[in-house]
Image: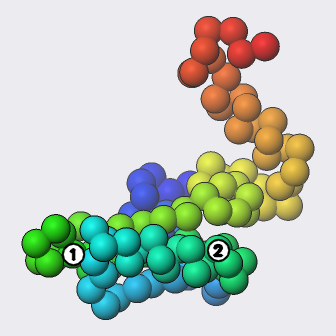
Amino acid sequence: MPKNLSSFLDEISEIPGELARVSRPIKAHAFEATAIMEKMDKEEDLRAVLVENPENLFDKPAGIPLVSNVFGTRERIARAIAHPIDDLKLGLSLEMTRRDRGKHCANPW
């Protein structure tokens, strides 16, 4: 199981069709990243997106990448929590509930 977001992105980058990389500078403040995601959504492209060179409000390199749609598929969710990929329906839902139980409310049921 990946220990952090960076190692998870490294892992899914090795799987064809899981990660789209945008290497050109993107003006996130001008909604270019949003436009990319909207286009991918309309095309039903479920890949995670890594914008490697977003720019800040002053059109200078932000110095930190931007990532979106990391948990866009049940397969990626399962991979992130080291759940078997062949158990993506009820088993994954139950595992996510088990891990989340009690974190957001005292009595979830």
- C-alpha span from label 2 to label 1: 23 Å
Residue at the right extreme? 90
Residue 85 quadrant: bottom right
Colour scheme in use: rainbow
Give the image location of residue 78, x and y in percent.
70, 55
Question: 71 above or below 34?
Answer: above
* Residue 13 showing in the rendered view: no
* Residue 32 showing in the rendered view: yes
Q: Which quadrant holds the C terminus?
A: top right
Q: Which quadrant holds the N terminus?
A: bottom right
- Identify the residue at horizontal 70%, vertical 63% (top origin): 73
Secondary structure under the numbered disc 2 in the rendered image: helix
Amino acid of disc 1: Glu
How packed mark 1 is, by other alpha carbons closer than 10 Å (few <14, some 14-19, many 20 or more), is: many
Residue at the bottom extreme? 24
Residue at image mark 2: 41
